[in-house]
Amino acid sequence: MRSKVRYQLLDPSAAPKSCRFLWLFLFLVACCIAYFLVFSTSTKGIFNPLKPDERNPMTYEQVMKDLRNEIDQRNVMISELKKDFEKLEFKSELSYLDSVSGKNRVKIVENDNLDMSCAAIMNRILPTGSVLKPLKHGVAFARIVYADYEMIEKQVQMSYHSQNTFCFAIDRKAPAKFHERLRAMAACLPNVLLLPDEESVDSSGHNINLAHYNCMRALINKPGWNYVILLQNHDVIVKSVYEMEQIYEWLGGANDIEITPEAGRLDKNFKWDPKSLKMFRNETGINPTVLNSKMKFAKGAAQGSLSRGAVDWMVRTTDLTTYIAQWNKGGFGVDEQFIQSFQVSADLGMPGHFTDGCLKQGKNTDFVSRMSQWKYGGADTCGSKTIRHAICLLGIEDFRTVAAYPNLMFNKMIPSFDYSIVECTAELLFNRTFLGQEDHKLEEDYYTKMVNVLYHKNHLDPNFKLECKPTYKRWAERQYPL
């Protein structure tokens, strides 16, 4: 029995009319859909980074702009959070400061039974296990002292390196016990020199220059150092041995000395030309005009930094005995014209010298060796709210300033007033020296662009023009206290 199902060949030419109409209908539908997708405004908002027109605003540039805005908003939030944290930190710091300042200041209590054996001294200055890296050049320290042995020993500890050399000139009036302890330290450490000839120094500056000069005469025979820093009893070094090495390298042989106008202290009863002063050990080859002309004079701090070349010149090329003796006959501030006058007398030829050109322009010259805050209107603007001889006494309130300023040493820290600032500074330098702490990066531009440094580097260039105003903000113009 045959099936009733009928089979038909799939021949398109034989396709029924209804099928052909179906294909035509489907083709028309497809065309409509294509037109809709291409030309309809419903495509608005579809991201196509390659088609930046008004119907496609979500371009690459827009996305990046949105991301930057979001980053800026988050940075603002982070900055606000950081400020809030610093306020909390500062509030905590102020709370701590209240506990160790004012009536609660930590003052030194001298140890009458301090072990002065060599082993004990060495262990205090360089504890067992402390390793120091070699220096390209050491530093020499010439310090006039009269009191506070434990603080003085602490200063040696803070700047100790076998390549550094320390010279001490003791005030003849210092207590016998102070003499004994310094002699004990000098006997133990080969790089500590104690001058055998003691001078009597005073606050008017008498014999200060002579004591420093005698230290220079002793130090010039010691190899390895390229700068000497001149110090007094309560000056505290605030840079590590490695930081000082780097700073002096940046100075490049220029002396770092404060230069201000001479204050009318010159005794006109004396002659002040090099020939009358018997200044040059050998006058052969010295220009007669230089020999017979009055020196130029300036004033500044007795502290400062001198290149080894300058010290060698002062000791071996010149004899400053008469020059120092004449100044010593003055009344007040007789120590403030010594190195300054050689520094501005360029024709004398001291290595690392400067010029009197800025003084002629009515401008003082910055120096970075010492930081002192002079306050003639009262102590309210001092960090410690305490003043002595018109200079702020430094307390623990000044620790932020100590850590941040570019100066090599601060004046004055007196242990009977506040010893915590001395100990905290010592800990700061220990961390920088032995733990690699970098809490404040050295300001290279400050040191390399100082007026005296640029002069030293370029003054032989006939096209060099002296610019007496530094391009940086001087430390004396910065906020104090921080």
Image (cartoon, rainbow, N blue to C red):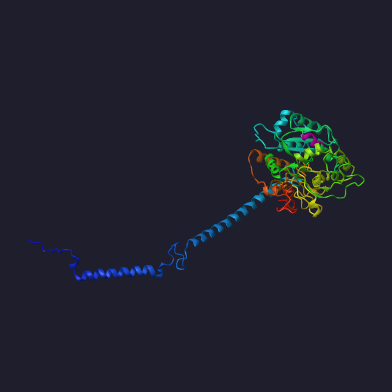
Q: Quadrant of the N terminus?
A: bottom left
Please state if 205 lies on the left or on the right of 441 as rendered. right
Residue 419 picture quarter: top right
Q: Which residue is drawn at the image coordinates 72% and 30% (left, top)?
A: 120
Q: In the image, what residue occupies the spot 82% across and 49% down?
A: 390
Q: Residue 311: which quarter of the image?
A: top right
Which region is colored magenta?
A: 214-220
How far across and how far down the image is residue 192, in percent?
75, 33
Q: Is residue 40 above or below residue 439?
A: below
Q: Is residue 343 magenta?
A: no
Q: Main secondary structure of the magenta part?
A: helix
Tell me, yes or no, if residue 261 can be seen here.
yes
Residue farthest along the left direction in this orientation: 1
Q: Position of residue 267 (x, y in %)?
A: 90, 46
Location of residue 396 in the rendering, given as x and y in whole percent from the top left corner: 72, 45
Q: Is residue 353 left or right of residue 5?
A: right
**Residue 218 colored magenta?**
yes
Instruction: Decide which of 180, 29 is in the foreground and name it.
Output: 29
Q: In front: 383, or 257?
A: 257
